[in-house]
Amino acid sequence: SGEHVLFLASFHNNDVTLSQFQVMICLLQSFIESLTIVLPFSPVGTMERVVREGQVATANTYAHMFSSLPNCGRPTRLMVYDLHTLQNRFYLNGNAVASLHTAIPLLKQKILQGQQQQQSDDSSSSSSKKKVDCIAFPDDGAAKRFGAYFEDMGLPVIVCGKTRGDGDTRTVVIQDGNAAGKHIVIVDDLVQTGGTLYETGKVLKEAGAASVHAFCSHAVFPKQSWKRFNVGGDRACFETFWVTNSIPTVTDALPVEEGIFEVLDLMDLIIHDLDHYGSSATMSNPQFLSSPMSPGKKKRTQA
């Protein structure tokens, strides 16, 4: 009792989810001072609408469950990173308040490291291949959501989008920007099967990009669809594919030692964001962006 409790949650299946809600209730009934729940990835972020009567909008269901948690004297803080549908925060009411954050600082850190290596290394070195000098978005929605985060870096931006072809076919095209000779990273909040991400990468390469990388905060990858992007896969068009460990049940299985994937650890960012509400505080914090990363391609953290 009397403690400020931080609860690291992962809702990767229904059994685990219900078990964790039981623990949250038990904590709140134990006279704690406050409860902060860190749920890096919200698995119901894409399930917020009902297009046919009888469907279950699980985003609304989970919001009811959070909002119905016991009151310890102050609202429960729910920290989520790069929530797919931002309006879901307003589903919460009563005893729970959303605290939305972004993993973009981890990507910016990688970009800055690549630029520093490029300045100190030979142009023929392998590290120069990872230099990023252009940001791309797969659609206008991603550009509006994440574009402002990169304004302080002064990098050119490319915006892609889908155009309707014959029948129901849709084709990804470059709507704004020039890819020729650029080392580009495509930025989005999550990847599932990755069809649009692949089509975007292919279009950028066809437009003359020197190299194409990808960053997605959440690696959903159902049915091990990441294999299609790895070396030898039919969607192997990226030199580097950065993801965070927001879904450790998936990222723990990624072949980071042999392949294109690099898993970025969220833990330092979470610790920073606990005391800096609002993504702008982290995005503009040079101390965080310039802090050294641990050696190696991956640190495994159970978030």
Image (tube, rainbow, N blue to C red):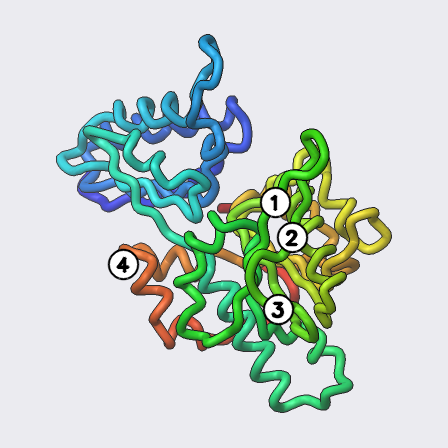
Marks 3/1 in contact by CB < 8 Å: the verdict is no
Amino acid of disc 4: Asp
According to the image, label 3 marks what residue? 178
Which label is found at residue 207?
A: none
Label 2 SS: strand
Marks 1/2 in contact by CB < 8 Å: the verdict is yes
Which label is found at residue 275?
A: 4
**Marked residue nearer the N-terminal end (4 or 2):** 2
The N terminus lies in which quarter of the figure? Answer: top left
According to the image, label 2 marks what residue? 173
Which residue is nearer to you in this view: 100 or 198? 198
Marks 3/2 in contact by CB < 8 Å: the verdict is no
In percent of width and height, residue 155 lies at 51, 74
Amino acid of disc 2: Val
Which residue shows up at 65% across the image and 45% down it?
Answer: 196
Q: Residue 74, relative to residue 302: is it above or below?
A: above
Amino acid of disc 1: Lys
How much space separates mark 3 and mark 2, taking CA atoms? Answer: 12 Å
**Marked residue nearer the N-terminal end (1 or 2):** 1
In the shown orientation, is residue 285 left or right of residue 123? left
Which residue shows up at 62% across the image and 83% down it?
Answer: 117
Q: Is residue 267 visible?
A: no
Instruction: Single out the mark in the foreground, 4 or 2.
Output: 2
Q: Quadrant of residue 127?
A: bottom right
How much space separates mark 1 and mark 4, taking CA atoms? Answer: 40 Å
